Image (spheres, rainbow, N blue to C red):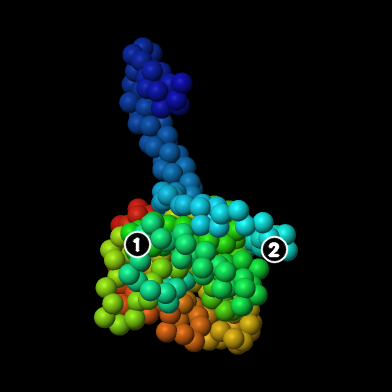
């Protein structure tokens, strides 16, 4: 039985009737104060967002049986997202997205000789999210998407080219926001915040070993000398951050 209830039940008429009101008041006040201390000491609940549907890589990769791929590499957590565009045509049917992703994969693992596709996720113009790099969508897989800042980050690529004046589909930006909210929520990172990331090499905007303060939901050009993700998609990043924050349950 809770201490407060026991105390109230103990406040019965009888020989100590005169003392009872003062004892009860002091006991209840003490119990309320203890409860307040307990609530104050309890850590705040993390801002988690629901995991959006993610199409597995087997859908676009098919029966690829490469034996020379090294095992996935992992970081301890994801604290930032870099948004990219794939610099590929925009006028595709969404049913063709798996074929397009496989083409991107072939280019990166072929002519570029990468061990896998660099992006952790890809999003088509209909808002469908595809798993990119191998290793598990729920895990902090180290990608190959932003020179110098692949650690503790996730790369999300928008299928298409989004230079100035090109419309960016709302379904696409909504999906990017949902994906970023989920991945950043796993480390309780506010999508509107800035985070400290250390450059791993001097091919980025920062010399190797430099710690930079970057947006938690950044464009590729925040970390690397590039026009990616295109002026049109870059202009949409503020609203993507706001939506991602709301999806995490953040009110301000």
Secondary element under disc 2, as helix, strand or loop, is loop
Say whether disc 1 or disc 2 marks the residue closer to the N-terminus.
2
Image position of 209 (left or right of 184): right
Image quadrant in which you'd find residue 113: bottom right
Image quadrant in which you'd find residue 163: bottom left
Q: Is residue 119 above or below residue 51?
A: below
The location of residue 63, given as percent across then percent down, is 60, 53
Secondary element under disc 1, as helix, strand or loop, is loop
- At horizontal 35% and vertical 55% (from top left) the residue drawn is 247
Of circles 1 and 2, which is in front? 1
The location of residue 3, given as percent across then percent down, is 45, 26
Q: Is residue 8 above or below residue 151?
A: above
Which residue occupies the foreground of this view, 51 or 197? 51
Image position of 40 (left or right of 75): left
Image position of 141 (left or right of 251): right
Which residue occupies the foreground of this view, 223 or 246? 223
Circle 1 is placed at which residue position? Answer: 93
Image quadrant in which you'd find residue 76: bottom right
- At horizontal 41% and vertical 18% (from top left) the residue drawn is 10
Which residue occupies the foreground of this view, 5 or 114? 114
The location of residue 192, given as percent across then percent down, is 38, 68
| Label 2 Cα neighbours within 10 Å, binned few <14 / some 14-19 / many ≥20 | few
- At horizontal 68% and vertical 60% (from top left) the residue drawn is 66
The location of residue 93, given as percent across then percent down, is 34, 62
Residue 68 is tagged as none
Circle 2 is placed at which residue position? Answer: 69
């Amino acid at each position: 039985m809770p201490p407060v209830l026991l105390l109230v039940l103990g406040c019965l008429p009888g020989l100590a009737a005169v003392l009872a009101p003062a004892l009860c008041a002091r006991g209840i006040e003490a119990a309320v104060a203890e409860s307040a201390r307990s609530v104050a000491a309890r850590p705040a609940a993390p801002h988690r967002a629901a995991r959006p549907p993610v199409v597995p890589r087997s859908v676009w990769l098919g029966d690829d049986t490469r034996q020379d791929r090294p095992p996935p590499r992992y970081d301890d957590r994801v604290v930032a997202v870099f948004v990219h565009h794939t610099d590929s045509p925009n006028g595709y049917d969404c049913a063709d997205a798996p074929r397009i992703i496989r083409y991107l994969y072939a280019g990166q693992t072929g002519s570029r000789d990468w061990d896998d596709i660099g992006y952790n996720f890809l999003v088509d113009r209909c808002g469908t999210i595809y798993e990119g790099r191998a290793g598990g969508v729920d895990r902090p897989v180290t990608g190959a998407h932003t020179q110098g800042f692949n650690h503790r980050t996730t790369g999300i690529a928008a299928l298409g080219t989004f230079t100035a004046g090109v419309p960016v589909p709302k379904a696409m930006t909504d999906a990017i926001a949902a994906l970023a909210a989920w991945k950043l929520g796993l480390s309780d990172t506010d999508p509107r915040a800035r985070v400290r990331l250390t450059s791993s090499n001097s091919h980025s905007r920062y010399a190797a070993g430099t710690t930079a303060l970057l947006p938690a939901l950044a464009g590729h050009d925040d970390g690397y000398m590039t026009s990616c993700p295109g002026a049109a998609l870059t202009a949409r990043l503020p609203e993507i951050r706001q939506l991602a924050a709301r999806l995490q349950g953040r009110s301000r």
